[in-house]
Amino acid sequence: MINIKEIAEAVGLEFEIPDIRIRKRNMENVNARMTYSYILRQLGYSYKEIGMSLGKDHSTVIHYVRRIKWYAQSDAPLKKKFDKLCAMFIDGVEEEEQDYSTHYATREAKIIENDLKNEINALKSEIKRLNLELSSAKGRQQFNEQDMERFENIFKVVKQRTRHGDEYKVFQKLNSMYNVI
């Protein structure tokens, strides 16, 4: 196997950065780390080993390896550097047969499909909850309408005989009357 330091130095030189392990997130540093990760992965290194050499988590390396070809397709200078470095270090490693852009589009479509399915399920749950709430509200409304019919005559008498401003006095008298009952 080729020495990891040699690969890191070559990638750093190609991308014109002093060290690929620098924790900067500018485009050149990230592209260099992605290219480095891809090359090491093609040479048989594990995600964990690559991550340790970069000071990154293995999940970050997985992202790098999966996305670098797609990014290279949309960025001509990156593609040129990526292809040059891959040719230097990966001789004999076959390119993937499947067109990466088609693979990426299919994968993204599946992710979107799953997100939509989750959203549909969430909306169905929300509809069920709202239907239950509506049923409960209709029940309360029906109860309130029955109460209004029961107390309609009492309400009319109190309304007719209570002078404006005396509502609190009527309330107190009704309250004391009901306390006695």
Image (cartoon, rainbow, N blue to C red):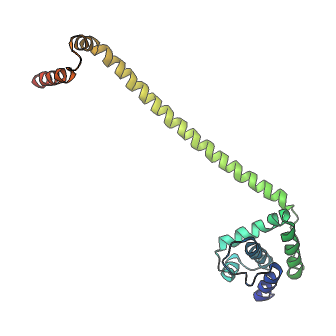
Residue 95, given in percent of the width and then of the height, sits at 88, 70
Identity of the residue drawn at 89% across and 78% down = 87
In the figure, is residue 78 to the left or right of 124? right
Quadrant for the C terminus in the image = top left
Quadrant for the N terminus in the image = bottom right
Q: Residue placed farthest to the left in the image? A: 180
The answer to which image quadrant residue 66 occupies is bottom right
Residue 16, given in percent of the width and then of the height, sits at 80, 81
In the figure, is residue 72 to the left or right of 177? right
Counting every numbered tag in the picture gives 0
| 85 w.r.t. 136: above or below | below
Identity of the residue drawn at 38% across and 26% down = 140
Front one among 6 and 26: 26
In the figure, is residue 134 to the left or right of 62? left
Front one among 126 and 167: 167
Front one among 44 and 36: 36
Residue 114, given in percent of the width and then of the height, sits at 67, 50
| 46 w.r.t. 132: above or below | below
The answer to which image quadrant residue 62 occupies is bottom right
The answer to which image quadrant residue 9 occupies is bottom right
| 129 w.r.t. 35: above or below | above
| 5 w.r.t. 23: above or below | below
Residue 14, given in percent of the width and then of the height, sits at 83, 80
In the figure, is residue 125 to the left or right of 33? left
